[in-house]
Image: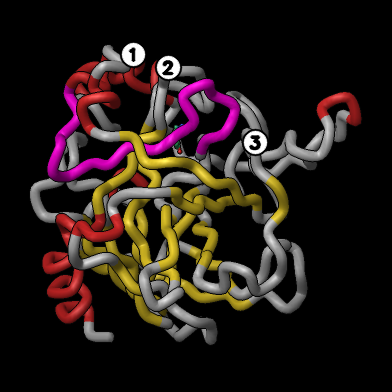
Amino acid sequence: MKRGAAFGAVALAAFSLTPGTAFAQATSDASEGPRTRIVGGTPAEQGEFPFMVRLSMGCGGALYAQDIVLTAAHCVDGSGPNTDIGVTGGVVDLDDPAAQKATSTEVLQAPGYDGTGKDWALIKLDKPIDQPTLKIADTDAYDNGEFDIAGWGADREGGSQQQKLLKAKVPFIDDATCKAAGGSYSGLVDAEEICAGVEAGGVDSCQGDSGGPMFRKDDAGEFVQVGIVSWGEGCARAGKPGVYTQVSHFAQDIKSAADQLGS
Ligand code: 4AZ
């Protein structure tokens, strides 16, 4: 788990980093209005974020290549041959019969990953998922502004996993402001982590969104991945931002790891 496996259950309770598991139908609550699912999100349109994939251990991911998924290190067990991870892509509704399914053949977890920073991993697939990929930021030029997040994770802290993909927008939060949130945030690894969230709370990634991308448009109007959902203290709490792996810092490592996997 992130933030020190030594603290075990404490870390688990504080940050709920356990990948999401079982589905449950989202309960409808008309009193909460249309922006109640995923912690301040709304449903994504079919095809809007075609690079999004759901992983069977209950994490998200993005297609780095059609046969390589970029996800979080804390979503996988380690590196090596692995045929245990099911991957679903090409749909917003995980029960859509048009879903494209693939299976892992190999996992490459960030070298040196120990639960603090370096929260990225690549998963090689047995066959390609025929969808557009998401390019990764290889400079810090896009590590600012307003970001998109999407996932099938919980719609509120402690809530259930979602059958349909939800999306939200979260603004960049600078490292100093993020650290000032206190607690584990004071241990933020500046170079390796990037924070985002709404200061007042109410909009955030949550349990089961881990491993999914945080992204925005680049100057050419194309999506570029700047983050990987990593951790946070609860979900959507005021003054407790979401923390994301800073993809630009690891771009060269990710590219060479992908070459190693053979894309
Ligand atoms: C998780 O466990 C998780 N609010 C993801 C993101 C955040 C918290 C937990 C950030 O997947």
Q: State whether residue 184 is above or below residue 218.
A: above
Residue 186 higher or lower than 28, as above or below: above
Residue type beneath disc 1: Val
Nearest the eye: 53 or 194: 194
* Mark 3: secondary structure: loop
* Extreme-right residue of the structure: 30
Q: Rate crowding at label 3 as few (under 14), some (14 to 19) or many (20 or more) other CA atoms within 10 Å.
A: many
The residue shown at (43%, 66%) is: 217
- Asked if ligand 1 lies within 8 A of label 3, the reply is no
Residue 126 sits in quarter: bottom left
Please tell me whether mark 1 sits on a helix, a strand or a loop: helix
Judging by the rendered image, the residue that carries numbered circle 3 is 40
Q: Is 191 included in the stretch rendered in magenta?
A: yes
Residue that mark 1 sits on: 10
Q: Quadrant of residue 28?
A: top right
**Residue at left 12%, top 68%?**
252
Residue found 21% across the figure and 36% down from its top: 115
